[in-house]
Amino acid sequence: MTTDVLDLILADHRRFEDLFRDLRDRTNDRGKLLDELSTRLVAHAEAEEAEVYPALRRFKDITDEEVEHGAEEHAEGNEELLALLEIEDTESDAWEEQLGELVKAVAHHLDEEERTILSDARETVPEARRAELGAAFVEARDARIEAGCGELDYVRDLVARTKK
Ligand SMILES: [Fe+2]
Ligand SMILES: [Fe+2]
């Protein structure tokens, strides 16, 4: 099993895209899928900010601006996620429109993160360090999942904290 942090992050990104596709389909259990997406998305972003971004910014080519911008985009994604979680009727037009807003924000972030931070890290961070960071990333991510980070109250607190 690989623990390269870059591969782990990319695998999560692909999982988010699969979940977006499944969420668009009204015949699926959108509530259940959204629970899964919310949990995975919040845990992923928090683990990146806690364990990966701070470590990567010490390498050349990965700038403070890239890392700070990444965290800002996480906050934007969390706001769109919260707005979606707060709409009860998963078959309503409002819900579908808000799903579109969430997909737009997250897709933009995944694209940018992959082109900048992750691509730079692939070139400059040695494999052994990437493996260490992979283990730290998984530990931080799974601790968030244990803590119920996809739940409405958790996401609400998170958005309130980052807005300050
Ligand atoms: Fe990511
Ligand atoms: Fe990210």
Image: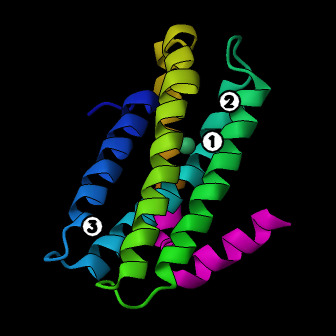
Instruction: State the residue in front, 111 or 53.
Output: 111
Q: Residue at x 16, y 75 (%)?
A: 28
Position of the N terminus, as image quadrant, is: top left
Can you identify the residue that label 2 sits on?
55
The location of residue 151, given as percent across then percent down, is: 50, 80
Whether residue 69 is visible here, answered yes or no, is yes
Image disc number at residue 51: 1
Toward the left, the furthest residue is 27
Whether residue 139 is visible here, answered yes or no, is no
Q: Residue at x 28, y 71 (%)?
A: 33
Position of the C terminus, as image quadrant, is: bottom right
Q: Is residue 90 above or below residue 38?
A: below
Q: Position of 145 compared to 7: left or right? A: right
Principal SS element in the magenta part? helix
Give the residues drawn in magenta, as a range: 142-164
Classify residue 32 by image quadrant. Answer: bottom left
Label 2 packing within 10 angstroms: few (<14), some (14-19), many (20+): some
Name the mark nearer the viewer: 3 or 2: 3
Residue type at the position of mark 1 = Glu
Marks 3 and 2 sit apart, C-alpha to C-alpha, by 34 Å
The location of residue 108, given as percent across then percent down, is: 50, 41
Marks 3 and 1 sit apart, C-alpha to C-alpha, by 29 Å
Can you identify the residue that label 3 sits on?
23
Q: Are marks 1 and 2 in contact (CB under 8 Å)?
A: yes
Q: Residue at x 71, y 38 (%)?
A: 69
Q: Residue at x 27, y 67 (%)?
A: 23
